[in-house]
Image: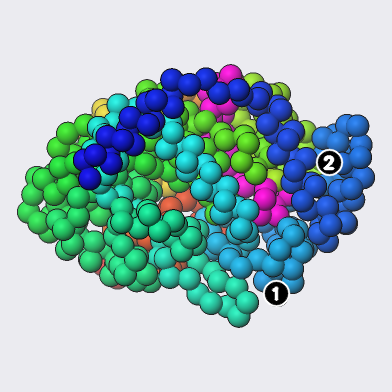
Amino acid sequence: MAIIGNLISRSLRIRKQFTFKLGTPRQYQLQVLRRLLEKAKDTDFGRHYKFEEILDSASYIAKYKERVPVHNYNKMHGEWWYRCLEGEANVSWPEKIKYFALSSGTSESASKHIPVTRDMLRTVKKVGVKQLYSMANFNIPPRSFEKGILMLGGTTSLYEKGDYYEGDMSGIQAKNIPKWFRRFYKPGGKISKKPNWEQRIKLIVRKAPQWDVGTVCGVPAWVQIVLEEIIKYHGVKHIHEIWPNLAIYIHGGVSFEPYRDSFQKVLGKPITFIETYMASEGSFGFQARPGVRGIKLVLNAGIFFEFIPFNEDNFDAEGEVKPNPKSYMIHEVVEDVEYAVMLSTCAGAWRYLIGDVVKFTSVKEHEIVITGRTKQFLSLCGEHMSVDNMNKAIDNVQKKLGITVKEFTVAGFPYENLFAHRWYIGMDNTNVDAERIRTIIDQTLCEINDDYAVERTAALKNVFVEVLPNDVFIDYLRCKGKEGAMNKFPRVMKGDKLKDWEKFLEGKVVATGK
């Protein structure tokens, strides 16, 4: 096995020494869109929007933007994808859809069904191979490539629904992984098929010493919970006493910064952290350079990107896109501007708003950071507070007070004829000074967000902090049927979700008498 690890490591280093002829970002994306249009031109969607005429146009990019409207999930599903669920073929992609990925449901719909095509599965594998090649840029021990890979995703059990299967995207991928990879895959097929998250975790915790894990993949909050449970159950000081060869943590889904300091406490030695950008709609990129905060978008793998400036010209106060928004291609974007991501994909999504808001940290390297969600931001009175702002505030709280914040969410509400924010902070130890937390959050936001600072002297009258046991956040996800590795707690609560959260908290108070 040591020979295998050294061979893989050496082959990656050798490949890095070769210079490959590369196209420009614009050329890659033009090629991707043309191939998507050509393949889908005879689908019902393609005929409806006259893809054939778009392809014949000298300025087919402009014609495509002019003719095909922007879609969110509700529009795409309500007009097209519902027919795929009814068994129709050739709707928005030239095949009958065999798999549907169920999203975590943090926005728009509680139960999104995202088509997963054969072409999309090939694209996900292609991006995975590109990420493997990029590992040559990191100082990773050769032996890590021969160790187990613990993937803490959703259940791999897929539910048969007549002509199709539905389940977590991670489950669909697991069903289609190459046979050679199965020897590395942990926790293995038997445990991964367990539909109950708690049952899977118990089995992983008990069997952990039987595996030699070199890489862990998953959403930070749930990975941390699993590692802490393993440490506690086996009575060790840190996870490296169980897995001495653990060297890589591949994470995504939410910002890792609020978890970074607390994550270090479960480790016995430094490891390499690598961020990825994946969703039910596909695999979009990965961190390709060590020490650089930025995810490199993959531009030649079946996904055409457009970027809509996330401002009042293009989005309303609720984060809904306005008609005919201005969008930009990859070669037209600029750094440090917030954009909503829009995709056209080989799974039959067309000008589809995924809900993420990003900033380009490097236009040259087409690297981005995810700053929030179109519907998870607060701007009651013009404070324009993004999830990225919130993460930085929480990170500052942890560093200044030496505490660990495991979860949080923020709500805005009318207050004394003006407005206020309320932060709900989740911790294992709630014996902290909430007023000090409030002060640090408020000061940090004033320093990093000029709009927030202005509104704190005007319409944003107050900021409140409520410290809760972290179990409250987990219990809320559990009662909503969203406990598990693919689910994230929303960073912003609005509308009916806020009312539901407040009702849940009231029930907790009644139950405990506190």
Residue lying furthest bottom in this view? 162
Q: Residue 320's x, y, as percent?
A: 69, 47
The reply to whether residue 398 is visible in this rendering is no
Dominant secondary structure (helix, strand or loop) of the stretch shown in magenta: strand
CA–CA distance in space, label 2 to label 1: 28 Å
Other residues around mark 2 within 10 Å, as few (<14) / some (14–19) / many (≥20): many
**Which residue is located at x 62 percent, y 47 percent?**
354
Q: Going from the N terminus, do you reach mark 2 or mark 1 first?
A: 2
The reply to whether residue 159 is visible in this rendering is yes
Q: Residue 182's x, y, as percent?
A: 35, 58
Nearest to the observer: residue 157 or residue 104: 157
SS at badge 2: helix
Residue 359 magenta: yes
**Which residue is located at x 9 percent, y 56 percent?**
234
User: Quadrant location of residue 410?
Assistant: top left
Q: Residue 406's x, y, as percent?
A: 30, 46
Q: Residue 388's x, y, as percent?
A: 47, 34
The magenta segment: 345-372
Nearest to the observer: residue 330 or residue 334: 330
- Is the residue 55 above or below the residue 173 in the image? above
- Is the residue 158 above or below the residue 305 in the image? below
Q: Name the mark on residue 87.
A: 1
**Which quarter of the rendering shows the C terminus?**
bottom left
**Which residue is located at x 38 percent, y 35 percent?**
274
**Which quarter of the rendering shows the N terminus?**
top left
* In this picture, residue 80 sits left or right of residue 360: right
Q: Name the mark on residue 64.
A: 2
